[in-house]
Image (cartoon, helix red, strand yellow):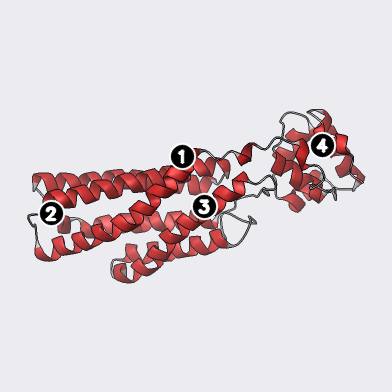
């Protein structure tokens, strides 16, 4: 039977108790790492009483030590249940971006094939709207990453945001001044975005042993789309995995939001995928 007082303990008593339970099971800190996917430094700091772990971290430790979490989780205040509103705004921005992007792609294709038209102001408006909504969506992912740490994805998200700032600025300047046209640099721009999508794909694939294989599937789509777009000759074919990738990003954002609200969220250890 679980000792209820155990779960209302504060540090350093909680850390000492976890250390006692680990030793009673005959486990080293490294062996406990393998059972709950935390890193050694985190376990060392918890056992030393240097940090107060969140509920999902304590859950993983107790489950690894064969203690029943369901009977004890009420003793913890779950900060994860309070989802920041900006994540929902970011999701809404992502939805708007998804549809605006189709209009932008069609207008770009028509512009390159037929040349400038009388709808320059509309084209600029669509580009600005696409950029702002996508930037808000990416920023939402950056903030979400702080709740579900993944260093590779974090760098990829900031890189994608920076590349968007650069190329959308170039597009708008070219459209407003007329000093250069989209076709002059279109392939270079597509190659840059292709690299960024591939990088994002690797970032999502870096989530290992998390709640499902969804991040790995999404990452594979992003990596495939990025490679095809970067190649130039595969831009059209890359639109299919790219569309699935962006839909997947929206779905994964909601999935992660729901998981971060749960008091039984499992921890994980992001890793760079092999190969």
Q: Earlier in the sequence, mark 4 or mark 2?
A: 4
Question: In this view of the protein, which residue sits in the foreground, 122 or 109?
Answer: 122
Residue 238 makes an appearance in the image: yes
* For discs 4 and 2, the disc positioned in front in the rendered view: 4
Q: Position of residue 269 (x, y in %)?
A: 64, 49
Q: Earlier in the sequence, mark 1 or mark 3?
A: 1
From what the image shows, is residue 199 above or below residue 239? above
Q: Residues within 10 Å of mark 2 (few under 14, many from 20)?
A: some
Label pair 1/3, CB-CB below 8 angstroms: no
Q: Is residue 118 left or right of residue 62?
A: left
Give the CA distance from mark 1 to mark 4: 32 Å
Q: Residues within 10 Å of mark 3 (few under 14, many from 20)?
A: some
Q: Residues within 10 Å of mark 4 (few under 14, many from 20)?
A: some
Q: Earlier in the sequence, mark 3 or mark 4?
A: 4
* For discs 2 and 1, the disc positioned in front in the rendered view: 1
The residue pinned by badge 2 equals 181
Question: In this view of the protein, which residue sits in the foreground, 230 or 79?
Answer: 79
The residue pinned by badge 1 equals 86
From what the image shows, is residue 161 above or below residue 185? above
Residue 163 makes an appearance in the image: no
Q: Earlier in the sequence, mark 1 or mark 4?
A: 4
- Quadrant of the image for the C terminus? bottom right
The residue pinned by badge 4 equals 7
The residue pinned by badge 3 equals 254
Q: Position of residue 64 (x, y in %)?
A: 80, 50
- At 73% from the left edge and 28% from the top edge, which residue is drawn? 50
Does dot 4 land on a helix, a strand or a loop?
Answer: helix
Q: Is residue 257 left or right of residue 142?
A: right
From what the image shows, is residue 236 above or below residue 59? below
Give the CA distance from mark 2 to mark 3: 38 Å
Q: Which mark is residue 50?
A: none
Q: Position of residue 171 (x, y in %)?
A: 20, 49
């Amino acid at each position: 039977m679980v000792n209820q007082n155990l779960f209302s303990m504060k540090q350093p008593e909680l850390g000492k108790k976890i250390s006692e339970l680990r030793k009673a099971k005959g486990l080293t800190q490294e062996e406990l790492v393998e059972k709950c996917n935390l890193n050694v430094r985190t376990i060392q700091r918890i056992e030393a009483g240097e940090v107060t772990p969140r509920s999902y971290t304590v859950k993983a430790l107790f489950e690894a030590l064969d203690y029943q979490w369901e009977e004890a989780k009420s003793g913890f205040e779950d900060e994860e249940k309070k989802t920041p509103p900006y994540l929902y705004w970011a999701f809404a921005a992502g939805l708007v971006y998804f549809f605006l992007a189709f209009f932008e792609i069609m207008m770009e294709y028509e512009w390159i094939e037929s040349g400038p038209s009388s709808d320059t102001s509309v084209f600029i408006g669509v580009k600005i709207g696409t950029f702002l909504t996508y930037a808000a969506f990416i920023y939402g992912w950056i903030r979400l990453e702080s709740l579900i740490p993944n260093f590779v994805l974090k760098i990829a998200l900031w890189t994608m945001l920076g590349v968007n700032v650069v190329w959308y600025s170039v597009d708008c300047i070219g459209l407003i001044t007329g000093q250069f046209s989209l076709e002059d640099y279109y392939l270079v721009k597509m190659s840059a975005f292709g690299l960024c999508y591939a990088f994002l794909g690797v970032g999502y694939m870096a989530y290992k042993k998390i709640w499902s294989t969804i991040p790995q599937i999404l990452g594979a789509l992003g990596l495939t789309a990025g490679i095809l777009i970067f190649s130039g000759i595969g831009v059209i074919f890359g639109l299919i995995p790219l569309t699935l990738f962006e839909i997947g990003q929206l779905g994964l954002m909601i999935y992660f939001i729901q998981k971060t609200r749960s008091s039984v969220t499992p921890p994980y250890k992001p890793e760079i995928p092999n190969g």
